[in-house]
């Protein structure tokens, strides 16, 4: 969950690796329109031996932010992340909390205040490169390149470590397809096709970059409040250790840990290849990039609107320029107006370029990447320079991550 501006660089499955992915996984991402589970594919990966205890030894006293919530939510309500509690603790504290009875936990354990029978605990969406820093052996234990994601491993991945009943709110990601490797424990996935979006009552509040949330409590829905949900037909999947789940682009998903669980994922942007003639290939490249930049433009406008409205609906005075916490996901940050406007200008400049290419005629290369057709898939250089010159260090990093997913 979360978004291109905030996560690691997306993996790109290029043409030369597509066949390897098809053979390894038995899936053609160009045509697969439903989720797939590849059983046992990671049983030979070094990460299959991981446990919370082992990972805790590797990171030592490093503190990790855990999200904590009640095991049961009634009345069809959704437990938004802003309603959860947050604690910083070591992985060894979490391992102790999961395995020992409440009365035997050490006094120094910050999770001691939460009864395991009443609460769950989740270290969700942690960048492995931040958590494990320079521990190259950890990154190499996730060999995504064996599936055709050439040169990628745990360094481009996120890790999720949670107790039983820990979950993420049902949402839709606006980028790539998703690959999830289950390492320890089991996770239950509820997946809904994009065509059933209306049944899930989508909302952009609270705001998170490129994520759309559902207002429905998936496991205990209030059908009086959300009657269309009964028309949905979820794909329900239980992931076991050794499994990899393929989640197609734009599929909604609600995920819940059934046991103490460790999983790792990466998002993949597919460079599509068509064999219906070189001119159609070029046109497809332009149209797909055009659509992506339209989505980016829309997202930039959404960021601007959310910041403006969030300030004016804040309990504080608007003059204090403080954001309304109910309008923003706790893991999300909003950049300045100037930076948001430059994001928008960047996308509009690329759309202008693509619009000209769409009208242009001429010979095209049979390579999808569009370079031979004069298409720039990166940011518009003059605008990029303005972004980098005007932004502070945190916003500069924000833009570089956003640009890396272009």
Image (cartoon, helix red, strand yellow):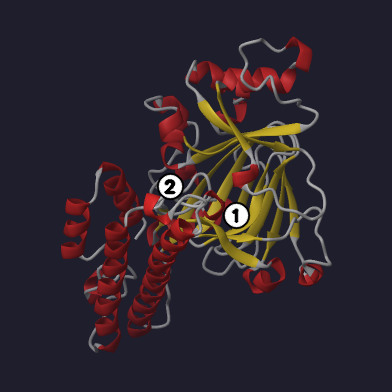
Question: Mark 2 Cα within 10 Å, few/some/many (few <14, many 20+)?
Answer: many
Question: Mark 1 Cα within 10 Å, few/some/many (few <14, many 20+)?
Answer: many
Task: Determine which of the numbered discs, if any, sits on residue 102 in the image.
Answer: none
Pick whichever, 379 or 224, lies toward us.
224
Name the spot of residue 84 as percent of width and height, x first.
Answer: 64, 40
Residue that badge 2 annotates: 7
Residue that badge 1 annotates: 246
Residue in the image at 52% along x and 45% along y:
330
Whether residue 300 is visible: yes
Q: Earlier in the sequence, mark 1 or mark 2?
A: 2
Relative height, residue 156 to residue 96 (above, below):
below
Whether residue 18 is visible: no
Pick whichever, 128 or 283, lies toward us.
128
The local secondary structure at tag 2 comes to loop
Residue in the image at 33% along x and 79% along y:
282
Residue in the image at 68% along x and 53% along y:
254
Say whether marks 1 and 2 touch (CB < 8 Å).
no
Residue in the image at 61% along x and 24% along y:
52
Relative height, residue 362 to residue 224 (above, below):
below
In front: label 1 or label 2: 2
Q: Is 223 placed left or right of 397 in the picture?
A: right
Name the spot of residue 68 as percent of width and height, x first.
Answer: 65, 35
Relative height, residue 372 to residue 136 (above, below):
below
The local secondary structure at tag 1 comes to strand
Q: Is 336 placed left or right of 114 in the picture?
A: left
Relative height, residue 99 to residue 345 (above, below):
above
- Distance from label 1 to label 2 (Cα)? 19 Å
């Amino acid at each position: 969950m979360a978004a291109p501006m905030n996560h690691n660089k997306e993996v790109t499955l290029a043409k030369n690796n597509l066949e390897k992915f098809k053979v390894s996984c038995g899936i053609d991402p160009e045509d697969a329109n439903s989720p797939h589970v590849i059983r046992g594919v990671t049983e030979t990966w070094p990460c299959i031996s991981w446990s919370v205890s082992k990972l805790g030894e590797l990171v030592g006293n490093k503190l990790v932010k855990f999200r904590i919530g009640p095991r049961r939510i009634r009345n069809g309500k959704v437990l938004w992340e802003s309603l959860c509690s947050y604690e910083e603790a070591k992985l060894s504290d979490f391992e102790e909390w999961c395995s020992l009875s409440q009365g035997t936990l050490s006094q120094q354990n910050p999770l001691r205040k939460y009864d395991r029978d009443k609460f769950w605990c989740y270290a969700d969406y942690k960048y492995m490169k931040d958590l494990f820093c320079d521990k190259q052996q950890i990154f190499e234990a996730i060999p995504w390149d064996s599936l055709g994601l050439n040169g990628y491993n745990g360094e481009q991945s996120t890790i999720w470590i949670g107790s039983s009943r820990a979950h993420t709110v049902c949402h839709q990601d606006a980028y790539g397809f998703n690959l999830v490797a289950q390492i320890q424990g089991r996770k239950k996935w509820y997946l809904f096709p994009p065509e059933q979006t209306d049944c899930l009552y989508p909302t952009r509040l609270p705001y998170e970059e490129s994520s759309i949330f559902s207002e429905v409590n998936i496991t205990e829905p209030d059908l009086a409040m959300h009657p269309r949900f009964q028309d949905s037909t979820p794909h329900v999947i239980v992931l076991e250790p050794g499994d990899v789940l393929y989640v197609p682009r734009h599929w909604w998903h609600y995920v819940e840990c059934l046991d103490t669980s460790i999983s790792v994922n990466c998002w993949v942007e597919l460079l599509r290849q068509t064999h219906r003639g070189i001119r159609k290939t070029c046109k497809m490249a332009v149209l797909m990039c055009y659509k992506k930049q339209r989505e980016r433009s829309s997202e930039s406008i959404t960021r601007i609107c959310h910041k403006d409205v969030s300030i004016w609906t804040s309990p504080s005075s608007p003059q204090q320029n403080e954001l309304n916490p109910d309008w923003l996901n706790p893991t999300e940050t909003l950049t300045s107006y100037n930076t948001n406007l430059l994001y928008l200008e960047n996308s509009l400049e690329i759309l202008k370029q693509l619009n000209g290419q769409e009208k242009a005629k001429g010979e095209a290369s049979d390579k999808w990447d569009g370079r031979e057709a004069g298409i720039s898939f990166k940011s518009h250089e003059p605008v990029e320079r303005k972004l980098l010159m005007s932004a502070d260090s945190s916003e500069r990093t924000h833009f570089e991550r956003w640009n890396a997913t272009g």
